[in-house]
Image (tube, grey):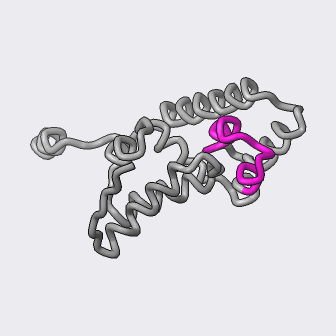
Amino acid sequence: MPVVIRAFTDAEALEVALIENIQRADLNAMEEARGYRQLIEKFSYTQDALGHVIGRSRSHIANTIRLLQLPQTVQDYIASGRLSAGHARTLVGQADPETMAVELIEGRLNVREAEDAAARRRAKRSAATARTPTPARSSNRSRANSASR
C-alpha cells in the first residue's frame, strides 16, 4: 500500500491528530463534543467547515456541542452510556435537566414527553416575551407640539 509522507508544523500535527481522534468510532458523545469545541476554538473552524472536514452535518456538530451546556452530572450520564445523546439533546435549556435525565434513565419519561416539555417551556417563554410591554417613546414632534401650546 502506498504511503504519503507529509511535513506538519506542531499546530498542524495537533489539528490532524484531533480530527483523527474525533473520527474514531468508539468516542462517546461528550468526548466528541469536547473535540469539536477544541477544533473550533484552537483552529477557528466554523461548524459548517468542521462538518465538511470530518464528514458530518453542521447541525450534528451544533447539536453535539450543545450537550456541553448540560450540567456535569447529565454529561456524566451521557459519557457512561446511561443516557443517549439523542435523549440528552431534549434536556438542553430545560429548567431542571438533572431531574429529567433521571426520569428518562429510569423510564418514567420518554423522549417524546421530554420534547413536549421542552416545547411547552419555549412556548411559555415566547408568550411571556410577547406580553412584556415595551416602554413608550416620546418623539421630538410630540415635545415640539406640546411646547408650542
Is-magenta flag for residue 82?
yes
Position of 78 relative to 123 (above/below): below
Q: Quadrant of residue 100?
A: top right
Position of 6 relative to 104 (above/below): below
Left or right of 148? Residue 125 is right
Q: Nearer the viewer, residue 137 or 76?
A: 76
Q: Which residue sits furthest front?
A: 1
Image x and y of residue 23, in percent? 51, 49
Q: Residue at x 69, y 57 (%)?
A: 71
Count of marks, rendered view: 0
Left or right of 147? Residue 14 is right
Image x and y of residue 130, in percent? 48, 31
**Where does the C terminus fall, quadrant-wise?**
top left
Is-magenta flag for residue 70?
no
Q: Nearer the viewer, residue 53 or 82?
A: 53
Q: Nearer the viewer, residue 11 or 106?
A: 11
Q: Quadrant of residue 122?
A: top right
Q: Residue at x 75, y 26 (%)?
A: 113
Position of 87 relative to 7 (above/below): above
Q: Which residue sits furthest bottom?
A: 10
Q: Residue at x 13, y 39 (%)?
A: 141
Q: Residue at x 70, y 36 (%)?
A: 87
Left or right of 29? Residue 147 is left
Position of 13 relative to 4 (above/below): below
Image x and y of residue 138, in percent? 25, 43
Image x and y of residue 55, in percent? 41, 39
**Part of the protein shown in magenta:** 76-92
Q: Nearer the viewer, residue 11 or 85?
A: 11
